Image (spheres, helix red, strand yellow):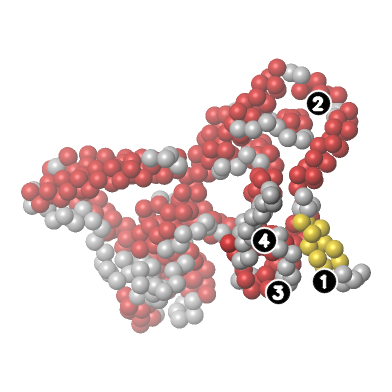
């Protein structure tokens, strides 16, 4: 008796086998588009079908040159081989997918043969109980046994970077829990960064991570306020660092500036930067570049707005003091709500599994506090917005700049008055 299995003729209904070695060792560090090219072509390789780079580019909505870059990348990683049709023609070639199991097995054989080449001082440290305990803890964290040269490379971080075993263990724990990355090359970059920052103890590392994570949260918060769901570019980070570190603005003030982009078709960091510069009274570049009036006139107007904001803030502070003295509970409510806001930020940074539920419950508490505050204010004959800042010009909020980025009419009037006085 013979047995036969029905063949599925439509290749879209069949499966493509991807080696776990590719997923674990190569895919994690590769650009996303390059992974798409690899997987798409791998599917067609199973059916021995002709597929040009131009066709791949059209299917994946990519530029032809990006597909070529992808193959060069995978060739440099050793996972594919280019078989050229003609010598000297670098654009015509067949892609051969290399069996990664054989590749890794071959590497292990070479490593075994070269085992005697490991420096004696490294061998001595490998026999150290502290190092052995470090290896055991790392394998527990990553959930697998070491492969190839991993133990020797990890040890080199201690000898070359002057990292401590505790630092290495903490780096693996951080990368796995926070970044979902266990590749030893990625962890090596993290360890090297910590050492370059002069971090030596776990306490210093935790303080450093808290600072960088908090700053990352601030970047994300600003971009979300502008309607962007992406990470900040290096230039955007540099600009925002100036707001927080040099201009001294808090996140609340920056978000107030972001609110001025409502109705603008293309909000951006540079627009917010111009607003915050005006608020800080340091928009010197605008003063020099402006051609509609004398530089000293523009500078005087900016100083006028700065003084105007200070006066209105002083009046608002006096109203707040009045309310706090008559209704002390209002101040308690505001401090409690502020504390809950900080807790929400920490929970968002922690990445805990139940973060959404906790944040929802905390927002309910804030809503209840705001309701209590509104009730107390009206019961004591205060308007709900009595403590808010009252602007002399509500159009530009005493900055001279409207939401569209243009000068406010009050700025034009002020400049005209100064020109008449000259």
Q: What element carries label 3?
A: helix
What is the CA distance from the residue labelled 2 to the residue labelled 4? 44 Å
Name the residue at the front extreme.
1
Q: How many labels does the image show?
A: 4
Q: Please tell me the numbered disc located at residue 122.
A: 2
Quarter of the rendering containing residue 359: top left
Q: Tell me the tag on residue 132.
A: none
Disc nearer the start of the sequence (1/4) = 4
Q: What element carries label 2?
A: helix
355 vs 153, left or right, is left
Pick the front one: 167 or 269: 167
Mark 2 closeness class: few <14, some 14–19, many ≥20 residues within 10 Å: some
Dot 4 or dot 3: first in sequence order is 4
- The disc placed on residue 54 is 3
Look at mark 1 in the image and give the residue it sits on.
Answer: 92
Q: Which residue is drawn at 19% across and 56% down?
A: 385
Q: What distance separates the C-alpha of mark 1 from that of mark 3?
A: 12 Å
Q: Residue at x 17, y 40 (%)?
A: 329
Q: Which of 60 and 319 is in front in this view?
A: 60
N-term-proximal mark, 2 vs 3: 3
Quickly name the residue at label 4: 43
Can the viewer see residue 242?
no
Gap in angstroms between the C-alphas marked 2 and 3:
50 Å
The alpha-carbon separation of the residues under discs 1 and 2 comes to 47 Å
Give the answer, above or below, for where 372 lies relative to 422: above
| Dots 2, 3 in contact, CB < 8 A | no
The image shows residue 193 at horizontal and vertical percentages of 65, 41
Distance of mark 1 from mark 4, alpha carbons? 20 Å
Q: Which residue lies furthest to the top in this view?
A: 129
């Amino acid at each position: 008796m013979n047995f036969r299995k029905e063949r599925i003729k439509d290749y879209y209904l069949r499966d493509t086998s991807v080696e776990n070695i590719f997923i674990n060792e190569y895919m994690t560090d590769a650009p996303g588009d390059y992974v798409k090219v690899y997987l798409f072509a791998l599917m067609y390789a199973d059916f021995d079908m002709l597929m040009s780079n131009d066709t791949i580019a059209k299917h994946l909505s990519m530029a032809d040159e990006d597909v070529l870059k992808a193959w060069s990348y995978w060739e440099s990683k050793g996972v594919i081989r280019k078989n050229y049709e003609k010598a000297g023609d670098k654009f015509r070639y067949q892609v051969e997918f290399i069996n990664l199991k054989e590749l890794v097995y071959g590497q292990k054989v070479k490593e075994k043969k070269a085992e005697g080449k490991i420096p004696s001082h490294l061998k001595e440290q490998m026999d150290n109980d502290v190092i052995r305990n470090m290896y055991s803890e790392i394998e527990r964290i990553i959930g697998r046994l070491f492969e190839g040269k991993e133990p020797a490379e990890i040890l080199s971080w201690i000898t070359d970077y002057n990292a401590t075993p505790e630092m290495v263990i903490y780096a693996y724990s951080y990368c796995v829990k926070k970044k979902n990355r266990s590749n030893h090359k990625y962890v090596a970059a993290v360890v090297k960064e910590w050492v370059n920052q002069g971090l030596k103890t776990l306490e210093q590392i935790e303080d450093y991570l808290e600072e960088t994570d908090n700053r990352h949260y601030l970047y994300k918060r600003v971009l979300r306020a502008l309607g962007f769901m992406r990470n900040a570019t290096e230039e955007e980070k540099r600009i925002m660092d100036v707001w927080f570190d040099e201009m001294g603005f808090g996140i609340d003030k920056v978000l107030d500036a972001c609110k001025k982009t409502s109705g603008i078709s293309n909000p951006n960091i540079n627009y917010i930067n111009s607003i915050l510069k005006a608020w800080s009274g340091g928009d010197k570049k605008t003063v020099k570049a402006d051609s509609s009036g004398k530089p000293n006139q523009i500078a005087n107007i900016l100083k006028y707005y700065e003084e105007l904001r200070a006066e209105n803030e002083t009046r608002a502070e006096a109203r707040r003091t009045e309310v706090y003295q008559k209704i002390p509970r209002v101040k308690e409510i505001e401090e409690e709500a502020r504390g809950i806001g900080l807790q929400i930020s920490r929970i968002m940074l922690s990445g805990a599994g139940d973060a959404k539920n906790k944040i929802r419950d905390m927002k309910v508490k804030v809503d209840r506090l705001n309701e209590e505050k509104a009730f107390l204010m009206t019961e004591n004959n205060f308007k709900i917005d009595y403590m808010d800042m009252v602007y002399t010009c509500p159009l530009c909020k005493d900055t001279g700049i409207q939401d569209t980025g243009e000068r406010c009419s009050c700025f034009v009037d002020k400049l005209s008055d100064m020109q008449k006085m000259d």
